[in-house]
Image (cartoon, rainbow, N blue to C red):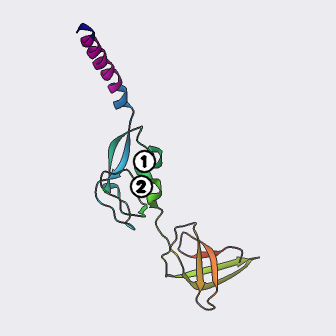
Amino acid sequence: MLNTIVRGVVAALLGMAFAGPAAADERRLPVPAVTIRAGEMIRDDMITERAFASNLLGVALFIDGRPTLVGRMARRTLLPGQPIPTNAVEDPWAVARGATVKVIVEDSGLSIVTYGSAMQSGAVGALIPVRNTDTGVVIRGIVQPDGTIKVVDG
């Protein structure tokens, strides 16, 4: 009987000893405060923080800072209170699929400007295919901050 009581007290003390460090090992991650739809820009007021156990499976695969989210675009619907995977957001598009864009080809001091139709959406710095509206030829170029496309290996 006494042995059972001692075991119970030891188990309770061990439980309390490990409960303290477990609470200290939590990570606070940014989570949506509201439902964020795919393609929607993320604003600061849409984000809150929530504590998660640091041993949460895949915790390293979730975004861990509010600055990483604000001003970016959701690639898929983000649900309130759920951690946000790193691949669920992207930089906002500077060029939308199907948009008419100015295409610039520069080679040996020569600059040629034409127009094309973006075949996919892209953020600044993305390499995207563009169909030349005059010839129908598909070329690849890098999206510039002003929304123009600079042809690679013109």
State the image coordinates of residue 65 (x, y, percent, origin top left).
42, 47
Q: Is residue 77 left or right of residue 116?
A: left
At 57% from the left and 67% from the top, the residue drawn is 126
Callout 1 secondary element:
loop
**Front-most of 36 and 72?**
36
The correct choice, above or below, for 57 with respect to 42 in the image is: above
Q: How many other residues sit within 10 Å of disc 1, few (<14), some (14-19) or many (≥20)?
A: few
Q: In the rendered view, does 129 fall on the left or right side of 1?
A: right
Left or right of 99, for residue 42: left
Q: Is residue 59 magenta?
A: no
Q: x and y percent of residue 127 in the render?
A: 60, 70
**Residue extending furthest bottom?**
134
**Magenta portion: prevailing SS class:** helix
Please state the extent of the stretch shown in magenta in the rendering. Answer: 4-19
Depth check: 86 or 73 in front? 86
- Residue closest to the far front: 1
Other-residue count near label 2 (Cα within 10 Å), few / some / many at <14 / 14–19 / ≥20: many
Q: Give the CA distance from mark 2 to mark 1.
A: 7 Å
Residue furthest right as drawn: 108
Q: Quadrant of the C terminus?
A: bottom right
Q: Quadrant of residue 21?
A: top left
Instruction: Specify the label residue 91 is tagged with.
Output: none
**Residue highlighted by disc 2:** 69
**Quadrant position of the N terminus in the picture:** top left
Q: Mark 2–mark 1 contact, CB under 8 Å?
A: yes
Tell me the element at label 2: helix
The residue under the point 39% across, 32% down is: 25
Question: Which numbered tag is attached to residue 65?
Answer: 1
Residue type at mark 2: give it: Leu
Left or right: 27 as drawn, with respect to 153: left
